[in-house]
Image: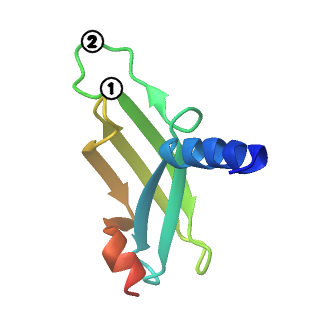
Amino acid sequence: MGIFDKLKSIFSSGNQSNLIDIYVEDNKCGNQMKLLFRKSYDIQKVYEDNREAAYEISKVVVCDECYNKINLHLEFDKRYKIINQEIESGKIISKEEYENN
């Protein structure tokens, strides 16, 4: 393994562990989308002690086929597992549902 291969493996493996994949289906046209969120940038830490969530994200996702707006609010625990989700005009689907479409 050369030095460039070693550097490439360090940076590529670090990027994958920093990403969270969320799969969403639009209620209007049925389009399925894969959303990628960076833990270090897109997801905010929750500083309120009275909440169960450690991290959260609120986004408006625009469907790339029908331009429908999907409001997405997710709350995560300390291990970035979804503990609460609210979504309008769409639904969260599994990776298998996305890949089988």
Q: Relative to 97, say whether 87 is above or below.
A: above
Q: Position of residue 89 (x, y in %)?
A: 40, 66
**Image quadrant assignment for residue 76:** top left
Can you identify the residue that label 2 sits on? 49
User: Of the residues under marks 2 and 1, which one precedes in the sequence?
Assistant: 2
Query: Which mark is drawn over residue 54?
Result: 1
Q: Residue at position x 53%, y 55% from top?
A: 36
- Left or right: residue 8 versus residue 70 is right
- Left or right: residue 61 versus residue 25 is right
Query: Which mark is drawn over residue 101?
Result: none
Q: Position of residue 16 (x, y in %)?
A: 53, 49
The C terminus, quarter of image: bottom left
Q: In the rendered structure, which amino acid carries the disc numbered 2? A: Asp
Between the residue at mark 2 and the residue at mark 1, the CA separation in whole angstroms equals 9 Å
- Secondary element type, mark 1: loop
Q: Relative to 48, say whether 1 is above or below.
A: below
- Left or right: residue 58 versus residue 6 is left
